[in-house]
Image (spheres, helix red, strand yellow):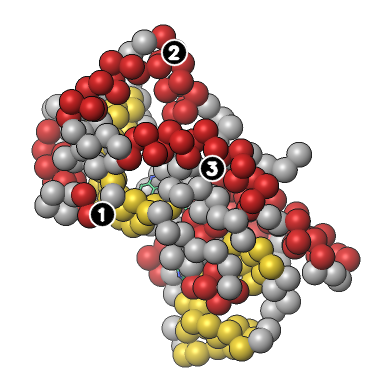
């Protein structure tokens, strides 16, 4: 059984078809989906759910925590939890298809996005306008920064904003993959496991890759009737391959003034800087897997 909150009901314009396709594939494989249902705790191998029609109890051999950066499942299994978080918010709205070519603008300005960056992505159908950074460093808070950035963001000249704008916001773990992400009773995936690139804060691709690995481990455990395969679901080994990105995250966190941001851009304009940016932003090795 997978748990999805009501607000996830395939509302997100560009991700909707992907979510719907995954849900269909899962249903065909026998998964039951319970919308609007929250996990609230457990007593041994009985898990407590708060469903729209009242509380439910479900027995399960294993539990998978796919419940985001502040995972209750991680807490209940005694696994690691994210301590190093950014907060981010973005507005997503439809644009006239084909008016401008798809473009990705990054803005490094510590007053708009302290310790991270502000962005405008034109994906051909939607504009995504967002900011993220360390919560305590936003001069007037996250939403004020997004309003300010939205008013002057690059690439939006002549773009009319429709009435319907979707705003997404939430914590983004950037401390790298957590050490203890599995135990004999279950495991964590996605943001709950800290599977987010510490530098780009991109979590979708790492989430899918780690989930594939988790599914293989659980499949092994269920087929063999042994909890032993979960011992190999170990964040420590995978985390070692994030070392370079963790170092770069520390560097980006230190960009605290416009002068430092300008210096960073000067470096990024050099051929090695451009090659590094291309690898970080458009490379396809966002997440290392065993083997
Ligand atoms: C503003 C913003 C922009 C982003 N942009 C990008 C991007 O462009 N590219 C990219 O790769 N990544 C991006 N990310 C990161 C990306 O969204 C996450 O890494 C990704 O969504 C992680 O997926 P997840 O399923 O692990 O967690 P989530 O997407 O957080 O999903 C967790 C789900 O668990 C549910 N849940 C929580 N607690 C419970 C409970 N007790 N019971 C039942 N359900 C529960 C929540 O309601 C939620 O639906 C962005 C993040 C933010 C905040």
The answer to whether 18 is drawn above or below residue 170 in the figure is above
What element does badge 1 sit on? helix
Mark 1 surroundings: few (<14), some (14-19) or many (≥20) residues within 10 A: some
Mark carried by residue 120: none
Q: Quick check: is the Cβ at mark 3 less than 8 Å away from ligand 1?
A: yes
Looking at the image, residue 111 sits to the left or right of residue 90; the answer is left
Counting residues from the start of the chain, the first of labels 1 and 2 encountered is: 1
Give the residue at x 30% y 37%.
254
Mark 3 surroundings: few (<14), some (14-19) or many (≥20) residues within 10 A: some
Which of the image's four quarters has the C terminus? top right
What element does badge 3 sit on? helix
The answer to whether 277 is drawn above or below residue 196 in the figure is above
According to the picture, the residue beneath numbered tag 2 turns out to be 272
Q: Residue 226 location in percent, x, y?
A: 85, 69
Looking at the image, residue 12 sits to the left or right of residue 159; the answer is right
Residue found farthest to the top: 271
Give the residue at x 54% y 69%.
74
Mark carried by residue 135: 1
Q: Residue 145 location in percent, x, y?
A: 16, 46
Q: Residue 47 location in percent, x, y?
A: 60, 83
Mark carried by residue 205: 3
Toward the viewer: 125 or 155?
A: 155
Which of the image's four quarters has the N terminus? bottom right
Mark in the foreground, 1 or 3: 1
Counting residues from the start of the chain, the first of labels 1 and 3 encountered is: 1
Quadrant of res 149: top left
Q: Residue 4 location in percent, x, y?
A: 49, 67
Residue 85: tell me if it is visible: yes
Give the residue at x 44% y 75%.
36
Give the residue at x 55% y 45%.
206
Residue 37: tell me if it is visible: no
Counting residues from the start of the chain, the first of labels 2 and 3 encountered is: 3
């Amino acid at each position: 059984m997978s748990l999805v909150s009501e607000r996830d009901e395939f509302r997100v314009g560009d991700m909707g078809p992907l979510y719907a396709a995954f849900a269909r594939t899962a249903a065909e494989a026998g998964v039951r989906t319970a919308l609007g249902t929250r996990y609230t705790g457990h007593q041994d191998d009985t898990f407590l759910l708060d469903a729209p029609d009242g509380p439910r109890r479900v027995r399960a051999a294993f539990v998978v925590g796919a419940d985001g950066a502040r995972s209750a499942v991680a807490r209940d299994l005694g696994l690691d939890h994210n301590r190093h978080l950014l907060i981010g918010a973005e507005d997503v709205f439809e644009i006239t298809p084909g008016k401008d070519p798809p473009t990705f603008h990054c803005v490094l300005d510590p007053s708009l996005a302290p310790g991270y960056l502000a962005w405008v992505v034109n994906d051909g159908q939607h504009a995504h306008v967002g900011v993220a950074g360390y919560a305590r460093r936003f001069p007037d808070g996250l939403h004020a920064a997004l309003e300010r950035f939205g008013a002057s963001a690059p690439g939006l000249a002549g773009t009319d904003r429709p009435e319907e704008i979707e705003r997404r916001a939430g914590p983004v773990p950037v401390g790298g993959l957590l050490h203890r992400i599995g135990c004999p009773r279950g495991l964590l995936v996605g943001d709950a496991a800290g599977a987010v690139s510490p530098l780009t804060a991109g979590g979708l691709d790492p989430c899918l890759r780690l989930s594939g690995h988790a599914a293989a481990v659980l499949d092994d455990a269920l087929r063999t009737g042994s909890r032993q395969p979960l011992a190999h679901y170990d964040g420590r080994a995978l985390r070692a391959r994030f070392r370079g990105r963790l170092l770069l995250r520390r560097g980006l966190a230190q960009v605290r003034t416009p002068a430092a941001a300008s210096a960073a851009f000067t470096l990024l304009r050099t051929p090695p800087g451009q090659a590094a940016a291309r690898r970080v932003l458009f490379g396809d090795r966002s997440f290392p897997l065993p083997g």
